[in-house]
Image (cartoon, rainbow, N blue to C red):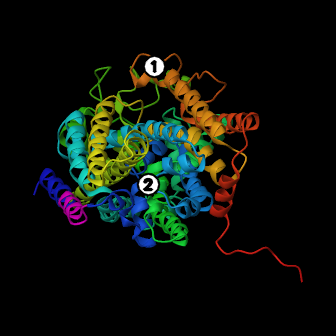
Amino acid sequence: MDQFTINLLFVGASFALYIGIAIWARAGTTSEFYAAGRGIHPVTNGMATAADWMSAASFISMAGLIAFVGYDNSTYLMGWTGGYVLLALLLAPYLRKFGKYTVSEFIGDRFYSPTARLVAVICLIVASVTYVIGQMTGVGVAFGRFLEVSNTTGLLIGAAVVFAYAVFGGMKGVTYTQVAQYVVLILAYTIPAVFISLQLTGNPIPGLGLFGDHTASGEPLLAKLDQIVRDLGFAEYTVHHGDTFNMVLFTLSLMIGTAGLPHVIMRFFTVPKVSDARWSAGWALVFIALLYLTAPAVGAMARLNITDLMWPNGTDGQAVSLEQIENEPQYDWMATWQKTGLLGWEDKNGDGRIQYYNDASPAMEEKAAANGWAGNELTNFNRDILVLANPEIANLPGWVVGLVAAGGLAAALSTAAGLLLAISSAVSHDLIKGAINPSISERGELLSARIAMAVAIAVATYLGLNPPGFAAQTVALAFGLAAASIFPALMMGIFSTKINNHGAVAGMVAGLLVTVVYIFLHKGWFFIPGTASFDDADPLLFTVKSTSFGAIGAAINFAVAYLVAGMTKETPQEIKELVRSVRIPRGAAAAQSH
């Protein structure tokens, strides 16, 4: 059986499962559509939350970014994992106790203002649509490769599949679908990692193999990788080379952005009790850890395998020849990925070989001139393809490749569905029912939610054709937007009685606007290519990249909110009592002296 047929079997079977679950758990009421009837078990919700969280950025893109940069991109791991701790401790139980369907509804009621609710809807839509762009980018990469079509065609097919099960199933259908998707994606991520770790280190646990010895050379795997990338003019893999200030801001932006993402917070409205919200977050961390502890090993081992393939005789020997690429089975993956437009090479000096090295490194100029090299000839290696291509690079069995295809699509589609639910809920429940037509029927609200979701899919698909970066980089921008706008409002809404409606609105508007403008200045206005005034390599403000600005936007949000609140009318007493009742366990009495 050829690889294409195996891919179709795995992907087709998984999609049949997802759509079947969506039909079985079809939402019939607004409660089921928005919050799954508030009847999801904490373990089930934790698994669904993990799938919702581990998007194309985590599954497809993160290991690729780590592989080609090394230590500096471990910030993705630190920021996203740390953010979940913040979410579990500071937000999830209190929001569940408040008892509303959506984040925007909480903000509107807590700050006793329809305007605050409307601004929260806008912030949510901006962050969520940016996030969905990253997911649709991953969907296009995965479909394009495994259905052997162009990236654009793959993106359109993926959009149709998301529409099929997210629009009809609502939160109830998506929850159970995400449980199935988690099982698929974690198996698809860890099984190839185990195979590759055994090949390279003899250790079946990838996280331990990463710090073990390379089987062929006997030296530590990371030391060997450091030496190889240094020989090719790249920065050492295990050393910090970037700007520390930007690194700290980026990690903080990812952390507080995590705690402000509406599609993740919505998951904690689906459990029966407040205590279940905490347990859900705890279980989600356990399920997330299975992938996140494996990702650094996947990135490092893939980088080593790629380099070995491009320099089969060692970095001091001859590079791989065009004849080898065209005729030897271990290079078949290059031809198949070339069809997607995400991998490319060119024999610039006409020597029949493909030299892969850092031609921007001054240290390589002398060596390149001595050998007659005309520049790096691996001209295109999209970071988002690494995890999906990893089993083929390591020459693993065809069924593993098919499993990874299903896993990559599960990761992208599960998060896309959660984000689309957040968008549709904001439009139908908070905008239409909350502001435009409060008397709308339940049936009309469901219809408007599904229409909003369909429109969001269309917009995200269009923008996904020309994303502002790799999947994880685009997602990082969304985290920055959530960090600058939603997270401060939630924190102040729960832990401060001083912030009034005027302060909350002013803070959200200021945080969102300054962050959006900073991103557009560096990534192009509305992400249109060619409209950027600055570049992340030479940013506007010190060394702060667009992906790191969310933390500064959050600080501006907090500052403006407190300043405006101090200049305007005090928060009403009944709202102060509401805030205290959310924070303090029901029935708790004052401490007694003895």
Q: Pointer 2: residues within 10 angstroms few (<14), some, or many (20+)? A: many
Label 2 is placed on what type of residue?
Trp
User: Is 27 placed left or right of 205 in the picture?
Assistant: left
Find residue 341 and report its horizontal and vertical position in percent: 26, 32
Q: Is residue 324 visible?
A: no
Residue visible at 73% across and 43% down in the picture: 570
Residue 53: mark: 2
Label 2 secondary element: helix
Q: Which residues are magenta?
A: 15-26
Find residue 214 and report its horizontal and vertical position in percent: 47, 58
244 or 256: nearer the viewer: 256
Q: Is residue 114 visible?
A: yes
Residue at label 1? Answer: 369
- Marks 2/1: CA–CA distance: 47 Å
Find residue 77 and report its horizontal and vertical position in percent: 53, 51
User: Is 23 placed left or right of 452 in the picture?
Assistant: left
